[in-house]
């Protein structure tokens, strides 16, 4: 009996020593937590994951609160950014150049009608949907980042990697509903077919759009031409700039081409063989060096482009106040062909932005919310993924604390059982 008592006494003392040791360890860990993470609750990986789940799903709710006006302004801007190059290079300029080639404004509308119809049937709907999807993705990420910055003091930075990984994965999986494509194609075709401007407000919108587009393209063309021909005499004199031999050659060609356009402002965008030879001979006589025809063509491209944009801009500014004259003629005056084209584009962008906005708010946000939940459910079952996305001393410290607490509680239960047996 004495041996048994002695044995259990030794066991109790050993267990009590272990309990004291774990108590000290727990105190040290809790002290580390209080000193390093005083603002946070002791949440393990699973609890942190659930907290992140709620915050991620709330972001979709916040996105649904964006006003229709903000959606459509963003969509309209991005639509124009996405299609402007095609409209200018493949529709407007070829149609405009055809007027000078044929001396007939009717050729402008004919070419625009054909090109816009083909474009709307083949490329525009898919392009629009891709732009709509890009806007949704950009708005979601931008809003998420802005919300994090606004709530910086209260936000939990340890969750950011997880939240961004979930959002990126959901966005990667998301695709726009295909059935929206055909509906959009029909709407865009019908919108682009109507070139009649019905009221002054729409006229002013189209005139402003045409003017700003021409100004932007003229500015870009001026920059390219300046890069080709080098600094002006003023810049050389006052800013001590100089031209390369190539720039000097191009500047001489530019001078001859501008003289040609000055003598014939309605010149087509094509140079005849005789004109090329004349320019080459003039340059050879003045400078003593021959000029390649390729150099003339490359310079002509920018010189004529600038010339065309300048004249088109002057015309656009002149016709801003001509709406009532246009109205009286029932839209039959051929001189207003370019503003009619830009009205068609303006209206198409507006209608497309409205359709895309409705698709986003009525369908795509709901589907994105569902995809986020699916990704969160998958990640919640993946221990390796949670360990990869939720890292740092704060996480490991809670895990250590929880283990120590569990062991300490079991040791204390064992000590109580031993004391009862005693």
Image (tube, rainbow, N blue to C red):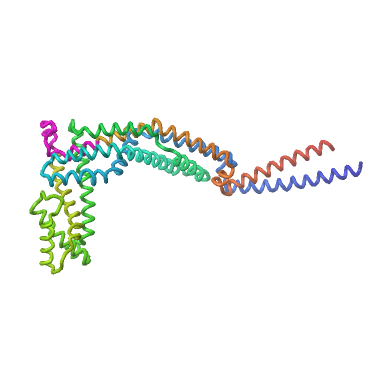
- Can residue 323 be found in the magenta stretch? yes
Residue 234 visible from this viewpoint: no
Horizontal side of 231 relative to 418 (left or right) equals left
Horizontal side of 45 relative to 176 (left or right) equals right
Q: Which segment did they paint magenta?
A: 320-346
- Can residue 315 be found in the magenta stretch? no
Q: Residue, x 40% and y 42% (percent of image)?
A: 142
Q: Above or below — where is 20 with respect to 274?
A: above
Horizontal side of 414 relative to 145 (left or right) equals right
Residue 143 visible from this viewpoint: yes
Q: Residue, x 11% and y 53% (percent of image)?
A: 261
* Residue positioned most to the bottom: 288
Q: Position of residue 33 (x, y in %)?
A: 60, 46
Between 52 and 336, which is closer to the camera in this rendering? 336
For residue 332, what is the image quadrant? Answer: top left
* Residue positioned most to the right: 1
For residue 418, what is the image quadrant? Answer: top right
* Residue positioned most to the front: 273
Q: Position of residue 19 (x, y in %)?
A: 74, 45
């Amino acid at each position: 009996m004495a041996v048994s008592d002695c044995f259990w006494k030794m066991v109790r003392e050993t267990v009590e020593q272990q309990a004291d040791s774990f108590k000290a360890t727990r105190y040290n860990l809790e002290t580390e937590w209080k000193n390093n993470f005083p603002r946070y609750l002791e949440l393990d990986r699973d609890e942190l994951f659930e907290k992140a789940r709620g915050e991620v799903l709330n972001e979709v709710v916040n996105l649904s609160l964006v006003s229709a006006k903000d959606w459509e302004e963003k969509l309209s801007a991005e639509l124009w950014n996405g299609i402007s190059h095609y409209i200018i290079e493949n529709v407007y300029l070829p149609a405009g150049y055809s007027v000078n080639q044929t001396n007939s404004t009717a050729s402008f509308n004919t070419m625009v009608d054909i090109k816009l119809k083909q474009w709307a049937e083949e490329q525009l709907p898919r392009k629009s949907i891709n732009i709509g999807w890009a806007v949704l993705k950009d708005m979601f990420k931008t809003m998420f980042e802005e919300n994090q910055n606004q709530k910086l003091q209260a936000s939990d930075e340890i969750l950011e990697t997880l939240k961004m990984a979930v959002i990126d994965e959901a966005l990667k999986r998301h695709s726009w509903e295909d059935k929206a494509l055909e509906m959009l194609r029909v709407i865009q075709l019908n919108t682009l077919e109507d070139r009649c401007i019905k009221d002054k407000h729409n006229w002013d919108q189209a005139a402003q759009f045409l003017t700003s587009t021409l100004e932007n393209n003229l500015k870009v063309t001026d920059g390219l031409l300046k890069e080709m021909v080098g600094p002006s005499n003023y810049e050389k004199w006052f800013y001590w700039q100089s031209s390369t031999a190539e720039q000097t050659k191009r500047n001489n060609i530019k001078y001859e081409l501008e003289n040609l356009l000055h003598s014939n402002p309605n010149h087509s965008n094509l140079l005849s063989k005789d004109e090329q030879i004349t320019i080459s001979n003039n340059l050879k006589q003045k400078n003593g060096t021959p000029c390649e025809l390729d150099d003339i063509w490359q310079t002509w491209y920018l010189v004529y482009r600038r010339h065309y944009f300048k004249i088109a801009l002057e015309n656009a500014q002149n016709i801003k106040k001509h709406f009532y004259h246009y109205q009286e003629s029932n839209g039959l005056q051929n001189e207003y062909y370019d503003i009619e084209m830009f009205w068609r584009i303006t209206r198409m962008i507006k209608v497309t932005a409205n359709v895309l906005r409705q698709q986003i708010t009525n369908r795509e946000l709901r589907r994105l919310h569902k995809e986020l939940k699916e990704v969160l459910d998958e990640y919640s079952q993946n221990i390796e993924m949670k360990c990869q996305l939720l890292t740092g001393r704060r996480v490991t410290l809670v895990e250590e604390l929880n283990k120590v607490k569990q062991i300490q509680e079991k040791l204390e239960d064992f000590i109580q059982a031993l004391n009862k047996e005693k």
